[in-house]
Amino acid sequence: MERLLKEISHCRICEKHLPLGPRPVVTGLVNSKIVIIGQAPGTKVHASGKPWDDASGRQLRQWLNVSDKEFYNTSNFAIVPMGFCYPGKGKNGDLPPRPECAPQWHESLLSAMHNVDLIILIGKYAQQYYLKEEAKHNLTETVSHFEDYLPKYFPLPHPSPRNRFWLTKNPWFKDRILPKLQEMTFEILQ
């Protein structure tokens, strides 16, 4: 696993498309228990090199009901985004994750982790890639039917502050989904 992460840290396959250059942000250990597959690092994470080191990360840790110490313990959580580097800015926020990363690296990373009890799929890119035709019509339907994907996958919306409208429009997420996510996370980490 250490060799694989070192190889990823030197990855340059999409360098010409990255406005800030390559800086892969991915973590994990052979014994990581939960894998978080999100979109791609934002500018703050690109600068720090620390995954989920932003407002979205704070919200995600609240959703999981874990401390920073628990979250950044790679025995607990591996962070494997769909795109490992900041993809650049688009009209409505960051561009989608670069399509090269997941096919190039995900299978090797996940097969190197022998203790994974749950894979959390954050956002439509991760859900479409991993759930394929089993994903529902849209993210809202996929998240509301999270039990269909258990025990392997747990789909979530992105915890970005930009998603306040979605969270307000879908109160069932806070009432029904988050308690189950927190219960599963607690059980796995014990």
Image (cartoon, rainbow, N blue to C red):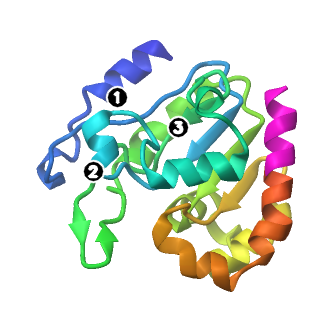
Amino acid residing under circle 1:
Ile
* Residue picked out by circle 1: 8
Expressed as whole percent of the image width and height from the top left, the position of residue 173 reads 75, 70
The stretch in magenta equals 182-190
Between residue 164 and residue 119, name the one nearer to us: 164
Determine the secondary structure under disc 2. helix
Instruction: Find out whether the residues at labels 1 and 2 contact each other: C-beta distance under 8 Å.
Output: no
Q: Residue shown at 80%/48% (left/top)? A: 182
Tell me the tag on residue 79. Answer: 3
Mark 3 vs mark 1: which is more N-terminal? 1
- Name the side, left or right, on which 30 lies relative to 25: right
Amino acid residing under circle 2:
Thr
Dot 2, crowdedness within 10 Å: few (<14), some or many (≥20)?
Answer: some
Mark 1 vs mark 2: which is more N-terminal? 1
Mark 2 vs mark 3: which is more N-terminal? 2
The label nearer to you, 1 versus 2, is: 2
Residue 148 visible? The answer is no
Expressed as whole percent of the image width and height from the top left, the position of residue 9 reads 30, 27
Would you say the magenta stretch is mainly helix, strand or loop?
helix
Q: Quadrant of the C terminus?
A: top right
Dot 3, crowdedness within 10 Å: few (<14), some or many (≥20)?
Answer: many
- Name the side, left or right, on which 148 lies relative to 27: right
Amino acid residing under circle 3:
Ile
Determine the secondary structure under disc 1. helix
